[in-house]
Image (spheres, helix red, strand yellow):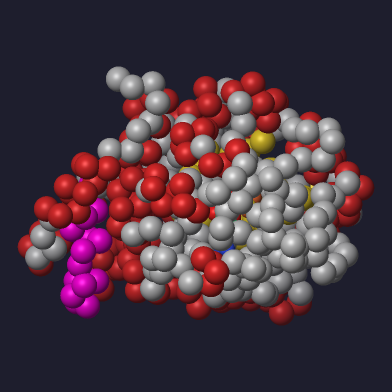
Amino acid sequence: MNDKLVINRAQIENTLTSCAPDAVAVREVLAKARQLQGLDPEDVCVLAALEDPELLEELYDTARWLKETIYGRRLVLFAPLYISNLCANECLYCAFRASNKEVRRKALNQEEIADETRALIEQGHKRMLLVAGESYPVEGFDYILKSIETVYRTKQGRGEIRRVNANIAPLTTDEFAQLKQAGIGTYQLFQETYDAKVYAEMHRAGRKVDYEWRINAMDRAMTAGIDDVGIGVLFGLADWRFEILALMQHIRWLEQRFGVGPHTISVPRLEPASGSDIAAHPPFPVNDTDFKKLVAILRLTVPYTGIIMSTRETPAMRRETFALGVSQISAGSRTNPGGYARQNDYESQFSLGDHRDLDEVVRDVAELGYIPSFCTACYRLGRTGRDFMDLAKPGEIKKHCDPNALSTFQEFLIDYASPETRAVGEKLISKTLEQMEAPARGLVQSMIKRICEDERDVFV
Ligand code: SAM
Ligand code: SF4
């Protein structure tokens, strides 16, 4: 076996040219998906090629059923924190690329990071994704470690950030070990495109030109002991069908090597970015129908892997894809350093599709019947990697994730929600409790009672 992941392009092209999406084949694949064991590349190809509206509805129905069966009606919420837009790379689609003179450069100092953290805590956030360009101030990689420490140390009122994930440039194995030591939750990194030729065209200078250094980053992270990793594709750079089959090869590779695949998959679509022609005119734009289709396909393909949807998408698209399989969303996001506390005008990394604050998103999500969750229990109890995947089976999720979602939601409603959101949320909690069966209902009732009696951070 190779000790480095190599995407097998010929195999993908062969699969893509040999599948026929007739109704019988599609329905066979959908029946297979209902066994909750995932799908093979040939199955994915059948679904990716289908266009018949009736079959498309059947695909969506299956994705909705699967989402509901495995994840129930929870949606985990987080916010990104952009600590720096310094970058030595030349990614043609990104506003932070080194040569872009339209962006004024800023790396937040530790005091500013604490201010940003306080602003996020005041909104009610408990989970943060730390984001940076690929170039650090004088202290180098220590800047990242110090920033994580600052976030965990910062308290505001009764709140704190309980889980810090990071989306930063690939590290050496030794640096990943330090990142783990700093208490990182998930390490997230998008390959952008798995098509090596397109990758070379899009990345013109800096460390990121090295496709292999990037594609093997998760192996180094997992070798260093980080067992929750998040992968993703920047959709719009190459054919999305190719990308999801390549993504599957990446997933299988990690499963074979480490006994567990990625914790999450992110599905960013290219958004306009200052000074970028590519971002304004993606070479392979993914239209809304294909985007929903690809989310549904991913849901069926890797049933137990979280799917993350960011505020790049509009509220309408986010609502539609919650039902199809999204399990985590960002909310109230700013993509410029200092964007939360100072409302400053440093340029953003890309345009947002959803500008609403956390309270509004929570209310909207709750009105749709989803339970906003701020849970960080698994990570703090050491239920990560393989242990998390063992837990992520339908019955187990009901025992842990649903109670924790409801207790963290109740905590949010008391400490941070507007009266309007609190009313919507409490109605949802009562309704959810009515529908729960014993013993789960008793457990949740006692957890909520503890929160109402002023205890915080109650989880199982
Ligand atoms: N600098 C690190 C890197 O490139 O991996 C991490 C942070 S980078 C700010 C996070 C992600 O933003 C990138 O991986 C890329 O997928 C995404 N991104 C960059 N430009 C974008 C755009 N115009 N629209 C949507 N997403 C974009
Ligand atoms: Fe820098 Fe990341 Fe933007 Fe590329 S995507 S220019 S590496 S911040």
Q: Count the labels in the image.
A: 0
Give the position of the C terminus as an image quadrant. Answer: top right
Magenta residues, start to end: 41-56
Q: Is residue 337 above or below residue 257?
A: below
Q: Is residue 50 magenta?
A: yes
Please determine whether, in this image, residue 350 is positioned above or below residue 155.
below
Q: Residue at x 66, y 61 (%)?
A: 95
Question: Would you identify the image quadrant in which residue 137 lies?
Answer: top right
Which of 229 and 105 lies nearest the eye of the viewer?
Answer: 105
Q: Percent x, y for residue 185?
A: 63, 38
Q: Is 459 left, or right, of 367 in this rendering?
A: right
Front residue of 358/187: it is: 187
Residue at the spot x=59%, y=45% of the render? 205
Q: Is residue 1 visible?
A: yes
Q: Quadrant of residue 188?
A: top right
Q: Residue at x 10, y 67 (%)?
A: 23
Q: Whereabouts is ligand 1, in terms of quadrant? A: bottom right
Instruction: Return the x and y of residue 361 as percentages of the image width and height.
Output: 63, 71
- Farthest residue in the right direction? 111
Does the magenta-highlighted stretch encompass residue 107? no
Q: Position of residue 210 (x, y in %)?
A: 51, 37
Residue at the spot 22% in from the left edge and 78% down from the top edge: 53
In what quadrant of the picture does the N terminus appear? top left
| Left or right of residue 277: residue 25 | left
Where, by quadrant of the figure, is residue 355 drawn? bottom right
Q: Position of residue 88 (x, y in %)?
A: 69, 45
The chief SS type of the magenta part is helix
- In this view, 157 is above or below 211: below
Can residue 374 be seen from the camera position used here?
Answer: no
